Amino acid sequence: MSQFNTSVFFFISIFCFALQSCSDGTDDQTEKISFENKFNDSKIRAIYNSRDKRNTKELLTYLDQDSIYQIEALIALGSVQDTSALPALKQKLETSNSLDIKIATAFAIGQIADPSINPFLIKFIIDHEKETELLEYVFEALGHCANDGAIYLMTHFVLSDEHVMKGIVKGLYRAKTWQGFESYDAAEQVMRIFTKSKDTETKEWCSAYFARLSSSNMVATFNSNIFANARRNNNELIRSNFALSIAAFSKGGGSSTALKKILHEEKSPMVLESALIATEKIKYDGMVEETMAFLNHEDPIVASVAASKLYKKLGWKESKQVYQIAKEMKHPHAQALALKAVMYERNKQKDIYNFTKGLYDQASSVYEKCYYLDALSNSKLGKDLVFETWKTTTEIPLKTKAIELLMREYASEKSLNSKEGAELGRIISDALKTKDVAQIYTTCSFMQNNSEKFKKYYPAVQLMEEVKTSLELPLQVEAFIELEKTIAHLESKEYNYDAPKENKGVQWDYIKKIKQDQKAIISTEKGDITIVLKVNEAPATVSMFVSLADSGFYDQLHFHRLVPNFVAQGGDPRGDGFGGLNYSIPSEFTQLEFTEGSLGIASAGKDTESCQFFFTLVPTHHLDGRYTVFAQVVEGLDIMRKIQYGDKINSIKIVRELEVSDQKAI
């Protein structure tokens, strides 16, 4: 070999070695993969890997690097929620010259929610009172961590501009939902902001605050404003929230009149549902008749809410009227709820029981069977049916419903004789021995809530320990946690939840071709819903969702949970809300908020997320920072609002651009 060739060979070798040395070692499987999202930057991938390992120390090293990495690390610390990061976060908030970095820092501090940082935040707000754009986010962080001093500051701070007003109302809302703080002064400040602000979103936050207050802090001062806006505000969400808040005026003058007017005048299903929910706590003549008028409402969810609010409120005469209506009702779920209310009052009447039993026998799905069985359990003639169903059915949702009904019946008893107590003990023991997550969770919850009455009939703790050690984690994590809580309760010990130390993290290969706002279509029996995936904010969740959708995992599953004006939840392979995968993924808390049509991932506690997802039917800000937002509905909100309990998911398809070869073929 010539000297020239030798030199060239030596140079090429050194160059290749240098290239290899500079490659990204954070995830060997993806170092040569091109990403169509922000994760093409290997350093950002490294930050998210550290986040998923809950490695605070590693994340803090990025706070001295370029601003893009600082912001990514700060958001990641908001998921880790480690108090050891607070000194560095305080320094960053004080010293950074970047508004974006300071906002991300405020987010991270708020997510940690440690009340010990209140003095620092209060002083920071006072010292930076003119930096109102930043204060919007610092006030919100203060609410997450709130103590009495924080509440005083927020309720007495001068409402100088829209940023301050939005920050204070969000801060007071967070103080209520994260720390349990509410007061007359806070309510007065929120109403003051509602009146003064010109910003629609701020006004919506104000109405949401009142919708979550308890009656002890709802006073006559606010009645006229709340009643007027519940009826006449042009914003449907604001009307709905204020209508719901009327429930807190159960002893307040004018509440019954206001609700009657709303029920007579309102056309929006969202507002009607809130008004009907509010009737549950309002006592006035004609309430039952007002509610009965909605049993055959064209919107099945409105009809179901109306029927549910009749439970335990019907007299002998009214129950006969409702039965006559129920026999002709067109919406099965609403019909079952109406019959449930009737049988609670007429619990020995055989013709009503037989009619409902016929509907149960002819039910077209296991979910219809579930709600008709619920109705039948209110008749004394239905007790044996519930027990036999629990013992014999192989349909998981129905078996889960049966044990729930059995435990509910026992919980309603003040005492048991020795024979009844022995039977309860056998039921609990048999349920635990099934090693079924729903059976264990339900019976353990019962044992915790009824130990003062029935502890002497419970099986030995040794059995619970044996069952606990046999469970498969993380698949059966809900049962595991509930068993641990029950054992601690029965032994008078404090229970501290310990999050899983390992999870699957981001499946990088599944998101390399997923762009931010990549579309997916959720096809349901009610129609198609188009969503956009937030891969930049929630890569672990999106990668799981994409991998499951591509495999057909979600096809033919159901929406097993519907809470009107809250969520529709589905994606459970068991179909009863207790199913999951043989792996978990980390919680991904970001600055995304739960608005109407957001998709979140269900959780049994931090870092236990799996395959179940939910739509938020309205803004549900008490979930912000506690559940992962991973997608948003962009088409089909009307379809989303029509989803009912038991509706089928036909398929979920990721909308991908045609490959080059496909385009050439066309």
Image (tube, grey):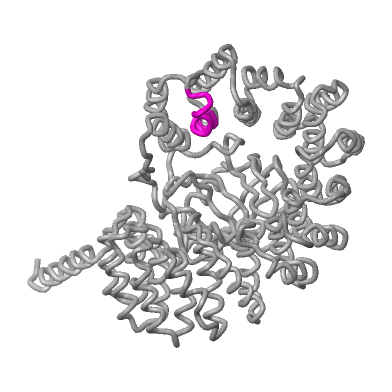
Q: Residue at x 54, y 14 (%)?
A: 422
Q: Is residue 41 above or below residue 645?
A: below
Foreground of the two, 93 or 631: 93
User: Furthest-top residue in view?
Assistant: 419
Q: Quadrant of the C terminus?
A: bottom right
Q: Is residue 54 left or right of residue 156?
A: left
Which residue is at the front of the view, 653 or 372? Answer: 372
**Vertical arrangement, residue 610 with respect to residue 278, above or below:** above
Residue at image coords 87%, 63%: 265
Task: Answer whether residue 429 is magenta in the image.
Answer: no
Residue placed furthest toward the bottom: 130
Residue 433 appears in the rendering:
no
What main secondary structure does the magenta stretch of the protein show?
Answer: helix
Residue 452 lies in the magenta-colored region: yes
Query: Measuring 42% from the left and 64% from the top, which residue is drawn there?
Result: 145
Which segment is the magenta one? 440-455
Snapshot quadrant of residue 318: top right
Using the image, determine if residue 162 lies above or below residue 29: below
User: Residue 125, can we see it?
Assistant: yes
